[in-house]
Image (tube, rainbow, N blue to C red):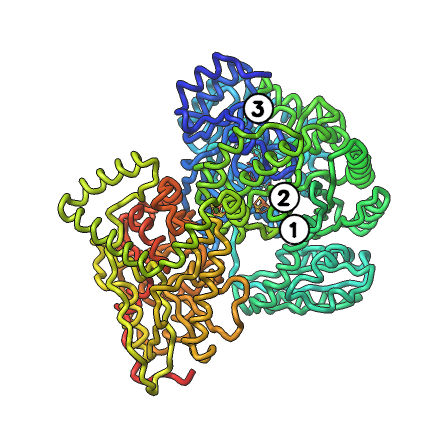
Amino acid sequence: MTLPAAFLAAVARLIPPQRRFDDPLSTLAFGTDASFYRLIPQLVIRVESEEEVQQLLQLANQQHVAVTFRAAGTSLSGQAVSDSVLLVLGDHWNGREIRQDGAQIRLQPGVIGAAANAALAPYQRKIGPDPASINACKIGGIVANNASGMCCGTAQNSYHTLAGMRLLLADGTLLDSEDPTSVARFRQEKAGLLAELAELGRQTRANQALAERIRHKYRLKNTTGLALNALVDFDDPLDILCHLMVGSEGILGFISAVTYHTVPDYPHKASALVVFPDVESCCRAVTALKPQPVSAVELLDRRSLRSVQEKPGMPAWVAALSEQACALLIESRAASASLLQEQLAQINAVLGQFPQERQVAFSSDPAVYNLLWKIRKDTFPAVGAVRRTGTTVIIEDVTFPIERLAEGVNQLLALFDKHAYHEAIIFGHALEGNLHFVFTQGFEDPAQVARYEAFMQDVAQLVAVDFGGSLKAEHGTGRNMAPFVELEWGQDAYQLMWQIKALLDPHGILNPDVQLSRDPQIHLKHLKPLPAADELVDKCIECGFCEPVCPSHGLTLSPRQRIVVWRDIQARERAGENTQALRQAYQHHGLDTCAATGLCAQRCPVGINTGDLVRKLRAQRARHGALAHRLGAQLPALLRAARLALRLADGTRRLLGTPRMARLMRRLHQASGQRLPLWTPAMPQAASPLRLDSQPLPDARPRVVYFAACVSQAMGPSASDGERQPLHEKTRALLEKAGYQVIHLASPDSLCCGQPWQSKGYFSEAQVQRQRLLDALLQASRGGLDPIYCDTSPCTLRLLQDHPDPRLDIYEPVRFIQQHLLPRLEITPQTEPVAVHVTCSTQHLGQAEALLDIARRCSTQVIIPEGIHCCGFAGDKGFTTPQLNAHALRNLQQAVQHCSEGLSTSRTCEIGLSQHGGIDYHSVVYLLDRVSRARAKVPQL
Ligand SMILES: Cc1cc2nc3c(=O)[nH]c(=O)nc-3n(C[C@H](O)[C@H](O)[C@H](O)COP(=O)(O)OP(=O)(O)OC[C@H]3O[C@@H](n4cnc5c(N)ncnc54)[C@H](O)[C@@H]3O)c2cc1C
Ligand code: SF4
Ligand code: SF4
C-alpha cells in the first residue's frame, strides 16, 4: 500500500528532511536486518525524541499506516524490516541512569547492551540479558525480542528482571510505570483497555489447562508468540501490559525506556572443555550439571567442532575426535577466588561420573579461557564463511525439554540427513535445552525454497509437537516462525494472542505480519537475495556487528549497508538494468565517505574489511596514475611545500586572527567544492626539519632506528597546543632519556610508507614507496640488528602488513614504549585527567590495551570516550570530507570536557580530535616525557 499523501505531508512538517529517507539508495540500505528477509521501506525516519515517535504513531494510527521500529537491526527472524514506514532510533536514545549503587539501571532503547554493562562494571553488576550480539544490539531490541544468551537462562531475561517501563501505545498514549502521575493519568484515560487486560488475565488464570500450559512453556526459554505468562504471573493490568511488551517485537507498542534489576557480575571465573564419547552421555552430564554452580554450559556437537578444528590455535586433538563425540564448554563464576575453587571441585566431582574422551581442565588463565570461548564463538561464522556465494546462513533457535535433550539432538541430526543439510551444525545453551542449529540455504530457485519449507515443517513438528519445546528460544518469532505459533501454542492460546494484539493495536499498524500473521506462507515470502558482489565481501551475513564502530554510520552508509547496496548494484547490472543513478549516489555514500581504515573488520565475525572493497572500487576509478607516480618521486619537495603551506596559513592566521581565518577558509573550502582543504584552528604549524647526525659514532648505548613519518616531519603542534616541540624532536629526546642512541635514516624526507597512495587506490605506487622505505630500514638497522621505531601508528601498520622482511623488527610507539622504554623510565603520574584516542591502526596492531596501560601509568584519570572508535580523519579525509570527521566525533567534546589534553599516536587524527574535542590532542610521547625521568639503574632486559 502506498503511503497516503496526507500522512507524508504531516510527516514532512514534523521531521526535518535530513532525517527522512525515501530515495532508492537509502531505502535499499535500510531494507536489511540480520535475517534472511528483505523488505524495502517506502519511508525511513530517524527518530530523535519520544515526542516525535508519539506524534508519528498518532499520525500512523489515524491514517492506518504500518510502522516498524528498528534499534540495531541485528534481528534474525525478519522482525526489524518493513515495506511501509521504518522508524530507526537516532543518536538521542542513549540515556542511562544508575540507581541504588548499581542494583538498578534505567536505560533508553538506543543504548548498546555492552555500553549498559560498561556503565555497570564499576559496581560489579550487569544487565541480565546477554545475547551474543550484545556489542551491537540495543536495549530496545533486547527487550522487544526478550533476547538472552549463554548465562542468562530464563531467570535473568528482560521479562524477569524488569523493574519498570516507559512505553507508547499504538495511538501514542504514554505510560511511565515509574511515574505516579503518568500511571494515574493512564489508569483514567485507558480504563477500558486496562479492564479488558485484567479480564483476559482472570480468564486465563481460571482456565487451568491453559494456565498450566503457559507456565510449562515458560519453564523453558521461549520467544514464540506474545509473552502470555504476563497474564498468569500478574493481576494488575499495568504489570500485565509492561510484561506483555517484553518480547512483543514492536507489535504492541514502543518501548521508550526500561528499568532493569541488574545481576551480579562476578569477577572470578574459569572454563573447561569436556568432550564426551557420544551425545547421550553429554546430555546426561548436562542434566547432572543443572543444579551445580555453573554459569554457562554450552553444547557443541561433532560437526560444530569440525567446523573450527582447522582454525589457528586450535588443539590438534580436536581433529582426531571420534565421529560421535559431543562436547560441553562449562563456565563457573564466583565472587571470590576461594569460592571459585570450591565450585570447581564440586563440578569436577559431578563430571567424574561420566565417560570422557578428552578434556581441557578448568582454567582461569586468559589464554586458555579465551581459546575455549573462541572455539564456541567461531562456530557460527565458520559455517557462514564456507557457504557457497549466493546462499544465506540461517541460525535456528529451538528449545527441547532438558530431560529429552539427547533425543532431540539426535532427531535433529536425522532431519539434517533427511533434507541433505550436510553442513549443518548444532550448538547451544544446553542447561536450558536451547539449541541453535546453523545451516546454509539458497533461495534462488523454487526447489531450494521447497526444500527449506519441508525442512521447517519437519522441525516445527519435531520441536513444538513431538517434544513440546519452543520453536524460538531467544531470537524472537519474526516472520520466520509466525506461521507456526498456533502449532506450538494451540488454538486457544493463539486466539488469546490475537485478542491482545487487537486490544493494543486495533488498526494493526504495528509491525504487521511479524509474530502474528494470517498468512501461512509468510515465512517463505520476501526472502533476501545475497547475490555475488565481490569476493572481498561475499561472505557477509549482514549481521550488522560492524555498524557501531563505523564513522560514517548515521552519516551516509554503514559497512553492512555498503555491502548491501553494492550487492544490489552488481545483481542489477548482471540483469542488464541501468544503475547509473544508484552508482552515482554510491560514489558519495559508499566510497567518498568511507574512511577505509577498516575498523569494521575488527568486529566482523567473518573477517570482512569493507574498507578493502572501497579501496578496490576507488582503484577502478583512479585516473591519475602518472601524477601519483610523479608525486612519489618528489617527496622532499612535497614536504617542503607542505611546511611552506602550513607556515603561510599560520602567518595569515596571525594577521587575521583565528576566528576570521576559520570563517574565510570555511568559505573557500565550500566555494572550491571541498577541493581546497579545510583549515581549522586545530591545524598544525610547520615542523622544523629533522636534525640529522652526520655519521653516528659507535657508543655503548643500545641503538634504535627512528623513522619519523612524513606527517611528523611536516606537521608540528597547533598554535594553541601548550607543547611547542615537533613530535620528532620530542621523540628523540624521550628515546635518549631512556638511554638509546637514535639513528635516523639517511634521507628520511624522501621516504614514505605509501599509505596516501594506498588509500586512494594507487596500489602499485604505494607498493613502490613502501618497498623503498623497507629497504632503507633494513640498511639503517644493520640488516635487522637494531629495532625500528616509527612514530605514527597508521604508517607502522602499513609497514607491517603483508609480511615484510622477517629480519625487520618494526615497532609502533605503543609497543616500543611498553617493551623498551617503560623499564628504563621512572614515572610520576599526573592527576589531571587525560583523554585517550586509540587509532584504528593501534587497534589493528592489537595495542589498544597497551596504550591505555601507558596512559594510566602517566595519569591517574584516563577517559576513553564512549562510542568513538574510528575518528574518520583518515589521513586527509578530515580536510577533504570534513563532515565524516565531524560526524564521527560529534559526541567527543562533551566526553572530554574535563580533560587537560588528549593522547593518540597519529598526527592527522589528532587534528580532527583537537578540533572536535576542544582540547589539544598530541602523541602519548609528550605526556610520557613530561611525567618521566630516566631510571638511575636500568633493569637487565
Ligand atoms: C550473529 C548473531 C548472534 C545473535 N545472538 C543472539 C543471542 O545470543 N541471543 C539473542 O537473543 N539474540 C541473538 N541475536 C539476535 C539479535 O541480535 C537480538 O535479539 C537483539 O536483541 C536484537 O536487538 P536489536 O537492537 O538489533 O533490535 P532490532 O533488530 O532493531 O529490533 C528487534 C525487534 O525489536 C523491535 N524494536 C526495536 N526497538 C524497539 C522499541 N524501542 N520499542 C519496541 N520495539 C522495538 C523491532 O521492531 C524488532 O521487532 C543474534 C543476532 C546475530 C546476527
Ligand atoms: S573502513 Fe571504516 S568507514 Fe569504511 S566501512 Fe569500514 S569502518 Fe566504515
Ligand atoms: S561486514 Fe561482517 S560484521 Fe558487517 S554485516 Fe557483514 S558479516 Fe556482519
Q: Residue furthest bottom?
A: 700
Q: Tell me what residue is drawn at x 18 percent, y 40 percent.
A: 660
Q: Which badge, 3 or 2, is on the more N-terminal residue?
A: 3
Q: On the rendering, which quadrant does ligand 1 occupy? A: top right
Give the numbered dot on residue 381.
Answer: 1
Give the numbered dot on residue 241.
Answer: none
User: In this figure, which residue is indicated by the disc labeled 2?
Assistant: 541
Dot 2 and dot 1 residues touching (CB under 8 Å)? yes
Q: Tell me what residue is drawn at x 42 percent, y 25 percent.
A: 52
Q: Residues within 10 Å of mark 2 (few under 14, many from 20)?
A: many
Q: In the picture, which quadrant includes the N terminus?
A: top right
The three-letter amino acid code for the residue at tag 3 is Leu
Q: Within 8 Å of ligand 1, the CB of disc 3?
A: no
Q: Within 8 Å of ligand 3, the CB of disc 2?
A: yes
Q: Which badge, 2 or 1, is on the more N-terminal residue?
A: 1
Q: Within 8 Å of ligand 1, the CB of disc 1?
A: yes
Q: Nearer the viewer, residue 335 or 140?
A: 140
Residue 236 in view: no
Marks 1, 3: nearer the viewer: 1
The three-letter amino acid code for the residue at tag 2 is Ile
Q: Horizontal and vertical percent for residue 224?
A: 68, 35
Give the Cα separation between the discs numbered 1 and 3.
Answer: 32 Å
Where residue 236 sits, quadrant-wise, is: top right
User: In this figure, which residue is indicated by the disc labeled 3?
Assistant: 510
Residue 933 in view: yes
Q: Horizontal and vertical percent for residue 321?
A: 78, 65
Give the Cα separation between the discs numbered 2 and 1.
Answer: 9 Å
Q: Nearer the viewer, residue 474 or 198?
A: 474
Q: Horizontal and vertical percent for residue 527?
A: 69, 32
The three-letter amino acid code for the residue at tag 1 is Pro
Where residue 738 sits, quadrant-wise, is: bottom left
